[in-house]
Image: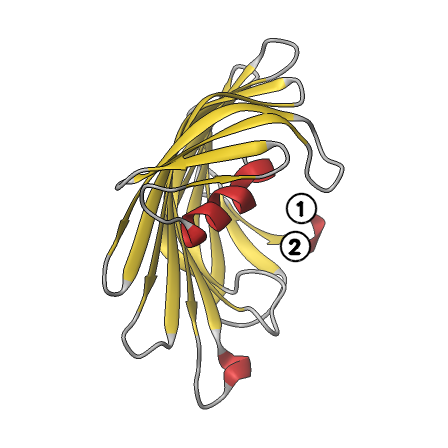
Amino acid sequence: YSSAVDDIITDLFQNGESSKSSKNDCYAAEYSDTGYSVTFDNCSFDDGEIINGSLVVTYKEGEESSAFTATYNNLTVGDIAINGTRSFTINSSSEGNDISFDIVSDMSVKLADGSIIEEMGSKNFTFVFDSENFEESVLIIDGDWTVKADGNTYTVNITSPLRTNFFNCEHASEGVMSLNKNGLAVTIDFGDGTCDDVADMTYPDGTVEEIKLGDI
C-alpha cells in the first residue's frame, strides 16, 4: 500500500533543497534543514487510488550512504489508512561493486472494513556486481520481520542470507530462513548455490520434505 507514494518520496528526497518548497498539481512539499513534509490533495498516479493526507521525511547523508525516514500520519490510499514509520538506508562501497538497501518498518494499515495489518522488522537487499563477468552478479537478501493480519501472526527470520544470481536464477539458490505462523515454525533451506527450483522444508517434528518453489 505504501508503494503508492514511494516514488514521490524518493524523488523529493533526491531533488530536495534545504529551506525551499515545491508544488505539484496535487501535492506540495515544504523543506527544512533536516527533511521535508509533503501533503497530498486528491492525488492519483498512473490512474491508481486517490491519495490524501500528509507525511514527514527526515534524512541524513554520509560519504557512502544516504538515509531517510518517512512518517505516515493517517495517509489514505483509496479506502485504506497508513500510519507509522519506514526507514530507508542506501549504502554503496567505495569500489562501486555493490549497493545495498536497508528497510526498517513499523507500520499499520487500516483497511476499508476496519481490519488492521501491521508490519514490523527489517529487510536488507544487496546487489553484488561481478566486474569481470557481469552475468555472475548476485542478489543477497537478509532480515527478519513480522506481519499481523486476520488474527494471525507471521514471522520471517533469515538465519543464513539468501543468495541468487539475479540474471540466471528465478529463485533463491542458497540460504536458510524460518517461517512461523502463530508459533508453528518450518525451516526452508534453499541449497548449496545450485540454480534450481527445489528447496528442503523441515517441519517442527524434524521431518524434511523437498518442495518445488515454482508450485508455491
Residue 96 image offset from top left, x and y in percent: 35, 76
Q: What residue is shown at x 23% (from left), y 64% (from top)?
A: 63
Res. 40 image quadrant: top right
Q: Is residue 33 visible?
A: yes
Amino acid type of the residue that numbered disc 1 sits on in the rendered structure: Ile
Helix, strand or loop for disc 1: loop
Frontmost residue, 182 versus 27 = 27
Residue 71 image offset from top left, x and y in percent: 39, 29
Residue indicated by mark 2: 212
Which of label 1 and label 2 is nearer to you?
1
Residue 57 image offset from top left, x and y in percent: 37, 36
Residue 73 image offset from top left, x and y in percent: 44, 21
Q: Is residue 196 left or right of residue 159?
A: right
Q: Vertical placement of 27 versus 142: above or below?
A: above
Q: CA distance from mark 1 to mark 2?
A: 7 Å
Residue indicated by mark 1: 216
Res. 212 image quadrant: bottom right
